[in-house]
Image (cartoon, rainbow, N blue to C red):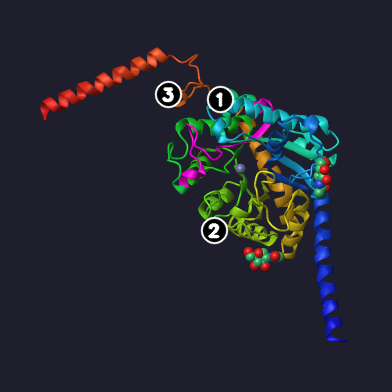
């Protein structure tokens, strides 16, 4: 044999191995498809069509990471669609705009019933798997969306919302976001305030998954301590591999493992390599790393498709999940480990959240409103608050302090 022939044979063998990994990946995903933690297609529908779904064709949409043929090719069997509205809506029309994003997700299920099945439970996800549809779940991305109101939180739950990201990239009156860790936002709550802790407990009681993507490290630790149910990171990666404050440090990964929670790994280049360039193998490194630190039962997929301006080479859109699974097979991941990461881990966490809600069914709903001064603005009225009493209390406190100072100065 000539040298060239040997080279060609070796090449063939390499391609065959690569192909067999991909075939095996597709085999696995045909019975256990991926449930992805975070996709911003609803935001694209707002940006491109002002939410007029009649003007959008999700079969032929071609300037997004997500469309129906790509979801099929990618073996996506479950998706948390983000009901996201930017932080500049905070204290303004955040609630209305979040309701509209929830509505556009419902409308996707109405317009494409052969593809999307809107579900709100683990039983619903399993039913959608059997029907070969995309189990469609709603995640509200950012605590600013509830405008510091338990009533709004519960109403979101009634509308089918099954996770809330505790912050987006802004502090709310009750919780700090990741920008606190970069120094660009002040630590106004130092993690969660007492009201914030009640938000977490109310989510536990309702059976809404707590999502810690976008929060400060102190908020991660506070929440892991207070939450009665396992938590998720719907779209975050490993801090140790890319020291970006949106990522999760090792000590938190270890607590997530202890509390049987889930890290759904973000594909955004800037969080994967801390660089504008990244590839599939860089993302696989985060899978390997988090598996090593937190165990395969704490790994999941949280691509952040259609929410980021750059995605890795080899993971250009939602059709590419099988390529990542093939790469993990090549790296020695077992079928059981991959099935866990694809769907079983999320199903386990969500079931535990459902069980926690059942366990807490004798706990009363939280009903103590946030202090009026925390939300005081031109966009808020004060109905229900005893403003005169609050003001009188503050005056009384002021007078008391004055008297104390006076006494002190007399005696010193
Ligand atoms: C993308 O879709 C638009 C509108 O349907 C169409 O005009 C365009 O040719 C498509 N582009 C590609 C690359 O398929
Ligand atoms: C992916 O990028 C890394 C650098 O971050 C490089 O070393 C590696 O060869 C690339 N892999 C592929 C398959 O392109
Ligand atoms: Zn996000």
Residue toward you, 205 or 28: 28
Q: How far apart are the alpha carbons under marks 3 and 1? A: 17 Å
In the rendered image, which quarter is residue 233 located in? top right
The question of residue 173 being in magenta is answered with yes
Residue 150's tag is 1
Tell me the quadrant of ligand 1.
top right
Residue sitting at 58 percent across and 55 percent down? 238
Residue toward you, 93 or 158: 93
Give the secondary structure at mark 3. helix
- In the image, 357: left or right of 389? right
> In this picture, which residue range is highlighted in magenta?
156-181
In the rendered image, which quarter is residue 272 located in? bottom right
- In the image, 126: left or right of 247? right
Is residue 68 visible to us here?
no
Earlier sequence position, callout 2 versus callout 3: 2
Earlier sequence position, callout 2 versus callout 1: 1
Residue 240's tag is 2
Circle 1 packing at 10 Å, graded few (<14), some (14-19), many (20+), is many
- Cβ(mark 3) to ligand 3 < 8 Å? no
Give the secondary structure at mark 2. loop
Image position, residue 84 (x, y; %):
63, 35
Give the secondary structure at mark 1. helix
Q: Where is the C terminus found, in terms of image quarters?
A: top left
Image position, residue 369 (x, y; %):
49, 22
Residue toward you, 82 or 34: 82
Q: Which residue is mark 3?
A: 373
Tags 2 and 3 in contact by the CB under 8 Å rule? Answer: no
């Amino acid at each position: 044999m000539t040298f060239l022939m040997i080279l060609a044979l070796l090449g063939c063998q390499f391609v065959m191995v690569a192909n067999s990994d991909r075939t095996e990946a597709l085999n696995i995903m045909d019975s256990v498809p991926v449930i992805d933690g975070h996709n911003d297609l609803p935001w694209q529908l707002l940006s491109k069509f002002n939410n007029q779904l009649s003007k959008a064709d999700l079969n032929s949409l071609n300037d997004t990471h997500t469309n129906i043929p790509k979801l099929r090719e990618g073996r996506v069997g479950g998706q948390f669609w983000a009901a996201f509205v930017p932080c500049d809506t905070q204290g303004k029309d955040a609630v209305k705009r979040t309701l509209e994003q929830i509505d556009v997700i419902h409308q996707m299920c109405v317009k494409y019933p052969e593809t999307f099945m809107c579900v709100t439970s683990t039983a619903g996800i399993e039913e959608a798997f059997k029907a070969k549809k995309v189990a469609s779940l709603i995640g509200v991305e950012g605590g600013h969306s509830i405008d510091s109101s338990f009533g709004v939180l519960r109403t979101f739950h009634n509308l089918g919302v099954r996770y809330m990201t505790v912050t987006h990239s802004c502090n709310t009156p009750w919780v700090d976001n990741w920008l606190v860790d970069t120094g660009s936002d002040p630590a106004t709550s130092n993690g969660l305030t007492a009201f914030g802790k009640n938000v977490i407990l109310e989510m536990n009681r309702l059976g809404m998954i707590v999502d810690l993507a976008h929060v400060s490290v102190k908020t991660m630790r506070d929440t892991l301590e207070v939450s009665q149910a396992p938590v998720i990171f719907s779209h975050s990666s490993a801090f140790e591999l890319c020291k970006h404050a949106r990522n999760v440090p090792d000590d938190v990964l270890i607590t997530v493992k202890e509390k049987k929670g889930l890290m759904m790994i973000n594909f955004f280049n800037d969080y994967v390599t801390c660089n504008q360039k990244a590839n599939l193998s860089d993302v696989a490194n985060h899978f390997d790393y988090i598996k090593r630190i937190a165990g395969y039962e704490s790994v999941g997929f949280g691509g952040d498709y259609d929410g980021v301006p750059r995605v890795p080479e080899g993971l250009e859109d939602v059709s590419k999940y099988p390529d990542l699974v093939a790469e993990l097979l090549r790296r020695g991941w077992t079928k059981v480990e991959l099935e866990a990461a694809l769907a079983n881990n999320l199903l386990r966490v969500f079931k535990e959240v459902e069980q926690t809600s059942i366990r807490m069914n004798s706990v009363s709903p939280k009903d103590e409103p946030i202090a009026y001064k925390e939300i005081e603005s031109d966009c808020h009225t004060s109905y229900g608050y005893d403003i005169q009493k609050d003001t009188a209390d503050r005056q009384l406190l002021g007078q008391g302090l004055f008297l104390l100072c006076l006494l002190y100065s007399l005696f010193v």
